[in-house]
Image (tube, helix red, strand yellow):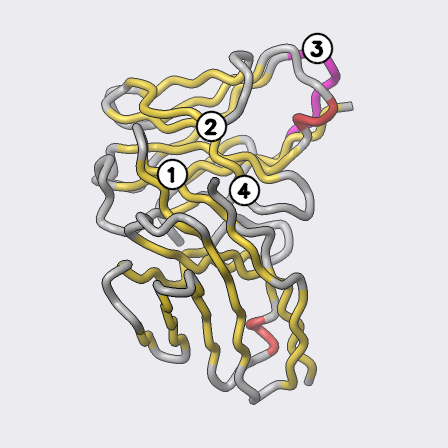
Amino acid sequence: ETGVTQSPTHLIKTRGQQVTLRCSSQSGHNTVSWYQQALGQGPQFIFQYYREEENGRGNFPPRFSGLQFPNYSSELNVNALELDDSALYLCASSLGQTNTGELFFGEGSRLTVL
Amino acid sequence: GEDVEQSLFLSVREGDSSVINCTYTDSSSTYLYWYKQEPGAGLQLLTYIFSNMDMKQDQRLTVLLNKKDKHLSLRIADTQTGDSAIYFCAEAAMDSSYKLIFGSGTRLLVRP
C-alpha cells in the first residue's frame, strides 16, 4: 500500500471523447508524475507537476494536459481520445524535484477507447 | 539517447535464485530502480540503488550495479511462486523534471 490513490480504476470511452483521471499523492509528497503504460510495454513519462506547475513533459501531444492542486493532488486530462490512448495510466508521487530516490506508483486507471 | 533493455522472459524453479538483467544508457542517472507488476495491478517499488553504489541488499533481493558496463541486475533468492510477475528496470533521467525511463519488463515465471 503506497498511499497513492487513483480514480477511476477502469473506464471505457469512445473516440473523440474527453477523459479526466485523478490522483492523490502520498502524504508529504509534493510532486506528481503521470505515465502511460500500453499493453505489453513499460510505462512512458507523460509529464510532472511540482508546486502546481508543469515541470517537464515527455513525447505526448498537447491534448494531454494536467493540473495539480494546492493539496498536491493531480488530474490528467486527455481530449479528442484516439484508439491508441487505450492504456493503463499511472500516477507516481515523490518528494521534491530532485527526489530522494523513492517514487511510488498508484494502482492505475485502465482506459479503454472504442 | 535514453534506452533501457531487459530480456523478455525468465523461468525458474521454486526455491532457486532468479537473476534479472538490465542495461541502460544514461551514465548520468542518479538512481536505478526495480519495480514489480502483478497482473492488472500498478507498479510496486521493490528497491532502488544510488549510482555511486555497487551493491544493495534487502532481505531476499540483491541489486548489483556495474557503472562501467551500464548493467544492473536483480537477484531474488529462494524464489517463490508469489514472485511470479513482470519486473521493470528503470533509470532516472533528470532534465527539467525527474522522470523514469523504463525497460519493457521481464516476465518471471516460477514453476512449483
Q: Could you tell me how far apart the alpha carbons at marks 4 and 1 are, in whole angstroms?
A: 11 Å
Percent coordinates x, y for residue A98 in the rendering: 22, 40
- Residue A77 percent location from the top left of the image: 51, 17
Same chain? Circles 4 and 3: yes
Q: Judge depth for marks 4 and 3 and give the one in front.
A: 4
Identify which residue, A39 or B101, lies in the foreground.
B101
Real-space Cα distance between discs 2 and 3?
A: 22 Å
Q: Which residue is mark 2?
A: A58
Q: Which structural element holds mark 2?
A: loop
**In the rendered image, residues at marks 4 and 2 fall on the same chain:** yes
Q: Residues within 10 Å of mark 1 (few under 14, many from 20)?
A: many
Specify the subunit that label 4 lies on: A
Q: Dots 2 and 1: beta carbons under 8 Å?
A: yes
Look at 24% across and 35% down and name the residue there: A97
Q: Chain of mark 1?
A: B
Q: Nearer the viewer, residue A42 or B59?
A: A42
Q: Gap between marks 4 and 3, in whole Å?
A: 24 Å
Task: Measure the C-alpha gap from mark 4 to mark 2.
Answer: 12 Å
